Image (cartoon, rainbow, N blue to C red):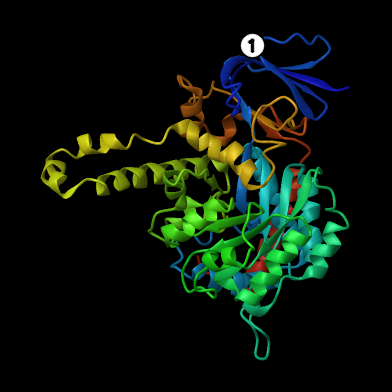
Amino acid sequence: MTRTLIKGGQILSMDDEIGRLTGDVLVEEDRIVQVSPSIEAEDAKVIEAAGAIVMPGFVNAHMHTWQGAIRAIGADWPSGGYFRWVHAGISPHYTPEDTHIGTLVGALAQIEAGTTTLFDWCHNNATPAHTDAAIDALDQAGLRAVFGHGTVKPKPKPGEPHFSTIPHPVGEIDRLRKGRLSQDEALVTLAACILGPDYSGIEVCRHDFRMARDYGLLSSAHIWGLNRLVPDGYLTIAREGLLGPDHNIVHANYIGDDELRVILDHGATITSTPAVELGPHPVEPLVSRVLRMGGRPSIGPDVEVDLTGGMLETIRASLLGARLYNTAHADRLLGEDEVEEREVAVPAARVTAPPVASVEALKWATIDNARALRLDHRIGSLTPGKQADLIVIRRDSLAMMGTIDPAQAVVHFAQNSDIDTVMVAGKLRKADGQVLDVDMAALRRDQAASAERLFAAYPIEV
């Protein structure tokens, strides 16, 4: 039996009963077996964590990992540019090999950045070979992943149906569910990434929601609340009996409070990607709205053609957005008779909305994201019996030196280079600050060749 003792760290367990403590974490094989101020385990391999922060690995609840080989091209695009130049432009030129290298680069970068679980929302899988290449890359990277089987969204050629009219391919879901992704306790599991009520009509929605439920899968859909093909969106989906805790909604910035309330009341989860959303969508991300309604949000980075997929940056953008809109909302709640006072004493008025605590943002990125993926019984907290997915963050760099509160240190100061150790299911994937078992020379060569071929096939001016 393999035993590992992480010793003497400042533990942020994300388990309400265990809380914070300075102490040890004992791992046996792939599971956490004890979290305590002091543990004796003479036969265990010891990772000294004195002065460091020990916490659950980050859970990335939404990313299109296939874009990992073509980063930093779209951050300055106007609204609509992503669909024009990625989905209708470069995406159709992807071979399975391009999907593999993009996913591998993106997944390994997640490990480097402290992510132990990734929801890979894959919608560049034109053929089964593309799908298999993406899953191969997740397996090769060695992180925990939910592979979200999506569908491509090219501009239709003359005589072809629009993608919005095409039901999700049951044959592919059946192939994966009965084949390599049949086990719900495996390191890589399956979800169905469907079009949903913004991108398909009610007949396709009925098919796709029922298909996912029939196969016992989490379904997930991109939603904005604009130009919807099912005009009432999730109000209709709920009336049809299709909405429940087995569904995840991404973005949804423009939906109304009545629809948001129905979504939360039915137990569905909502994932926000504020760093991307606040670019072309200068409207409140759903993190703060979900919080105000008593729900628990989840967060993700979304697209690496725009910005880094690292969860530290996602946490910071999400917390900043939540604090900004939480305070603005408190100002709007002031009565008309308080307007004059507000004009001369805005800081006093805003005392009614204390800042969202830093530790809350860590919960979004760990246990709440795990809940959104229906994995909170397995991961998301340092709870005995759960999978040993954890990270050790050192505090001896110039960036972290002198930090006092561990939650604030992670949220506001830590860099990827401070993440010293990453463990997934009890296996070290990053140690001494280096991602393990990666041939970087081959990875650079394959990434460069893929990018060169893709941009030759579809030139993009940056």
Helix, strand or loop at mark 1 = loop
Q: Determine the residue positioned at 40% across, 46% down.
A: 321
The answer to whether 140 appears left or right of 412 in the picture is right
Residue 273 locus on image (x, y percent): 51, 52
The answer to whether 125 appears left or right of 60 in the picture is right
For the question of whether residue 124 can be seen, the reply is no
Residue 294 locus on image (x, y percent): 47, 43
| Quarter of the image where one finds residue 247 | bottom right
Badge 1: residue crowd in 10 Å (few <14, some 14–19, many ≥20): some
Which amino acid type corresponds to the residue marked 1 in the rendered image? Pro
For the question of whether residue 166 can be seen, the reply is yes
Nearest to the observer: residue 180 or residue 47: 180
Considering only vertical position in the picture, is 389 above or below 253?
Answer: above
Q: Determine the residue positioned at 46% across, 57% down.
A: 277
**Number of numbered discs overlaid on the protein picture:** 1
In the picture, the quarter occupied by the N terminus is top right
Nearest to the observer: residue 124 or residue 145: 145
Nearest to the observer: residue 175 or residue 159: 175
Considering only vertical position in the picture, is 6 above or below 75?
Answer: above
Q: Determine the residue positioned at 65% across, 79% down.
A: 165
Residue 26 locus on image (x, y percent): 74, 19
Mark 1 lies on residue: 37
Residue 266 locus on image (x, y percent): 58, 53
Q: Determine the residue positioned at 60% across, 23% down.
A: 17
Considering only vertical position in the picture, is 203 above or below 5?
Answer: below
The answer to whether 383 appears left or right of 314 in the picture is right
